[in-house]
Image (spheres, rainbow, N blue to C red):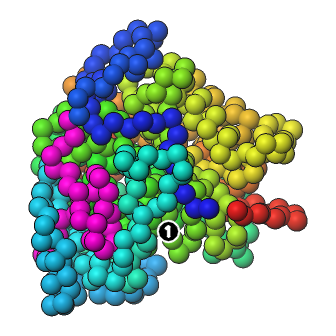
Amino acid sequence: MHAHRELNGNYPTGGQSPGEKEMEPPPANAAIAMYHQSPAASRLSSSLLTLPKELPAFCASTHGMLVRNPGLLNSRAGSPYYSVTHIGNLNNKPKKHEIQTWQKCFADSIAVCPMGSGASRLYSSLTQTLVNNSTTTTPLAHHQDPQHPSPSQGCHSPPEYPADPLELLRECEEALRDRPPRLLRAFISPGEEVDNSATQRTIRVMQWNILAQALGEGMDSFVNCPLEALNWAERKYLILEEILTYRPHILCLQEVDHYYDTFQPILAGLGYRGNFCPKPWSPCLDVEGNNGPDGCALFYDEARFDLVDSVNVRLCAVLIPTNQVAVVTTLRCRVTGRRLCVAVTHLKARSGWECLRSAQGSDLLRNLTTLTQSPGGPSGPTGIVPDTPLLVCGDFNAVPSEDVYQRFASSPLILDSAYKRLSRDGLSEPAYTTWKIRPTGECCTTLDYIWYSREAFSVDAVLDMPTEEQIGPNRLPSYNYPSDHLSLVCDFSFKKQEDHMDTFD
């Protein structure tokens, strides 16, 4: 049974954040207690639009939004992307009967453009896919309340005729032609023994905190970054350019506040399927003109994977629900036939909250153990061998010396951090995954990680970090990089197993 479920969660439709981005950290013993407060009355942005049920493709959930603009993209040249598969021409204009179908679908709907003009011209390249697909909602577990559907409910099958990723990348580059060139990065082989005959089995994973638009423009105070550089009309192209450049099979994102109006429909047109879990009390809701709550999103390439199960988890600390979430998705690889479980999370930010982050990490590990290990399952000499191997991506907001990092590093699930492979000894994390300047000073540190089951996966390649010179004196974000966090990209492959056999429900 393929299902989407929720754990630990009664998600409010909105509510005032406890001040994640602004409050000074309380004493450690008060960190957990604060999250027991009841949220304020719902303040969900009026920009969120419920779509008519008959609207084909994309999403039609209680938080769903789609705005069509028939204009075409502009573009910049010089793409490093060479894996070319021409599927179709993005610049084909919709036919007359397709325009009539759009008019019918939107006859009773009001299109709202929230902060950053979220209604992207990118939709014009995907309109032809809309009329060929019918709405299919991801099934929920039997305990799901139909009156309060999952925040990610309403994700749909990919278009029959996906967009051409190369053409879309070129259009992004043209739209960014007046900005400095993007950061050039290279893949580094960590020296593990790789089966060169199995390159088709490589699984590329991207982890990235993309910076919520509402927070970047309204709360984060990047003192050396001009507001013009954060303009959503162009910044969205920078984000999409990064994704299209590396074309991951699995994409894990944090601080997503343009899921329904940008990332879900555009990535669906490229053959991805996604799940989204918003924060219950997102700080984005405190920003005037916001686009709704931010949260975690997980996308996977449907040509490469079949969905087995997906769970939204609201992380707890001492049994108390917190404002942080995770998406945990189990997939079956169509190339190898083997399962893997992928999780994306974003733990509590700021110094002073180390105890809360540790508790949230412990809760996530407990959930992952439950979801990947069957009762009476096998155990190895150093810990639990999960029935389904793990990839855990996230902005942990924790340096390697913190307790939550140590909990993952010493977990019975036998996890390792992929980016340690960049170091000479294979034991050290990069010097930084985020580099920013705020009014409180400059922050250059490592907070983001890709954890993997080292008993099951080999790390074939790791995308290196840009140099200080490449990043520039004003740090991140900037005119040529859209977030204060750098993307992490790794190529994994399954290790060989003798007499391997997976069973499927």
Q: Is residue 430 left or right of residue 293?
A: right
Residue 287 quadrant: top left
- Provide the residue designation for mark 1: 301
Residue 220 appears in view: no
Residue 91 quadrant: bottom left
- Principal secondary structure, stretch drawn in magenta: loop
| Residue in the foreground of this view, choosing between 387 and 197 | 387
In the rendered structure, which amino acid carries the disc numbered 1? Asp
Q: Is residue 60 rendered magenta in the image? A: yes
Location of residue 393 in the rendering, given as x and y in whole percent from the top left corner:
52, 46
Q: Is residue 38 above or below residue 447?
A: above
Q: Is residue 90 above or below residue 173?
A: below
Measuring 38% from the left and 24% from the top, which residue is drawn there?
Answer: 350
Location of residue 320 in the rendering, given as x and y in whole percent from the top left corner:
48, 23
| Residue in the foreground of this view, choosing between 476 and 48 | 48
Magenta stretch: give its range: 43-71
Residue 65 quadrant: bottom left
Residue 95 appears in view: yes
Location of residue 337 in the rendering, given as x and y in whole percent from the top left corner:
70, 70
Q: Is residue 69 left or right of residue 397?
A: left
